[in-house]
Image: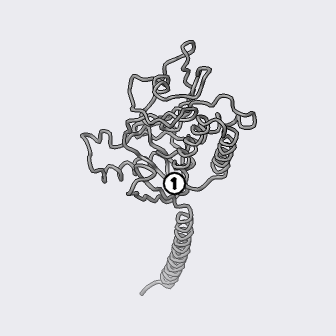
Amino acid sequence: MKSPFLCTQTGQFLKTSLLATRRTLMNMTTLFAASVFCLTVSGQAIAAEQTNVTVTTSADAKRMYHVAFNGAPRVSQVVSQGAAVIRANANNMLAHNTDTVYWQGAGLFDTENTPELASLKKAVTDNLNKLQEAWQDDAEKHASVTALSTFLAEAHFQSRIQVPLDEDFYLSGTKVNPLVQGDLMLVLPTRPNNVWVIGAVTETTDADFHPDYVADDYVDIAETLNTFGISDVTVIQPDGELEIHQTAYWNQIPKNLAPGAMIFVPFQGLPSALSSLNRDIPRLLQHRVM
């Protein structure tokens, strides 16, 4: 015969176990519901913060590709994914991807028309129109300004995000790897074989690239308007970097130019109200899409 005390103890034990099990199941249900809620909210947040990147080889390329990231990716992720897309669709790939992407000319741009860029572009356009009027009696100068205005009007501008874009830079493990977000354009061009000479020249000059040439050599190819000599020019490298290159015999310090660079020859004798043109035009050209 079983002891009443033992039966009582067993019943209490079973009751306690059932209550504990029920409590555990309720907690698990609550946690599961909370997890579903968090995933839903997280999914909504990710969708809202999706970063879309248009990948192309040039501003006027016939084919463009699209890559999407949840949230804000690192620049290295954008570069890696973009390069993979371009290489996968390259028609004439060389060994080890040689020259598939010209990294010195790569550019990452914000496709939104930022107020800063819109204001700068309008200021340059308006001031060039005023300069045309001021120099309308000088056929050579007027033609030079018209040629520059045409060059800028035919160019494609977007707000450049000034970050390193060389793939090897990130593969080396650099700590410089910021987050980017929004609607972006990643331009990964092939290597060009020219250098532009623009500004105070009789006509915009598309000169062949020579690895041993400095700025003065290219300026000599173009016919400039400057009658008092040129002591320096502004070079816009293909990655958007601005550099001052000395070109006079007394101050020349040889500096390299990369294929696709632009040399801006400053105007002399500008009306005082338009003197900012020599500074604003190179700043605008930093945002030109190759």
> How many dots with numbers?
1
Seen in the picture, residue 149 relative to 226 is either above or below; the reply is below
Q: Which quadrant of the figure has residue 26?
A: bottom right
Q: Position of residue 92 (x, y in %)?
A: 26, 47
Seen in the picture, residue 47 relative to 19 is either above or below; the reply is above
Residue at mark 1: 184
Q: Is residue 145 left or right of residue 206?
A: right
Q: Residue at image x 57%, y 35%?
A: 199
Q: Position of residue 278 (x, y in %)?
A: 64, 34
Q: Residue at image x 56%, y 72%?
A: 37
Q: Specify the amino acid type for callout 1.
A: Leu
Q: Is residue 272 visible?
A: yes
Residue at the extreme left:
95
Q: Position of residue 259 (x, y in %)?
A: 42, 34
Q: Is residue 148 left or right of residue 130?
A: left
Name the foreground residue: 18 vs 145.
145
| SS for dot 1 | strand
Name the foreground residue: 21 vs 278.
278
Seen in the picture, residue 139 relative to 1 is either above or below; the reply is above
Name the foreground residue: 109 vs 156.
156
Residue at the extreme bottom:
1
- Colouring style: one colour
Q: Position of residue 200 (x, y in %)?
A: 58, 32
Quadrant of the image containing the N terminus: bottom left
Q: Is residue 160 visible?
A: no
Residue at the extreme right:
273
Mark 1 surroundings within 10 Å by alpha-carbon count, few (fewer than 14), some (14 through 19), many (20 or more): many
Q: Residue at image x 66%, y 37%?
A: 137
Name the foreground residue: 167 vs 108.
108
Q: Residue at image x 43%, y 39%?
A: 166
Q: Which quadrant of the figure has residue 245?
A: top right
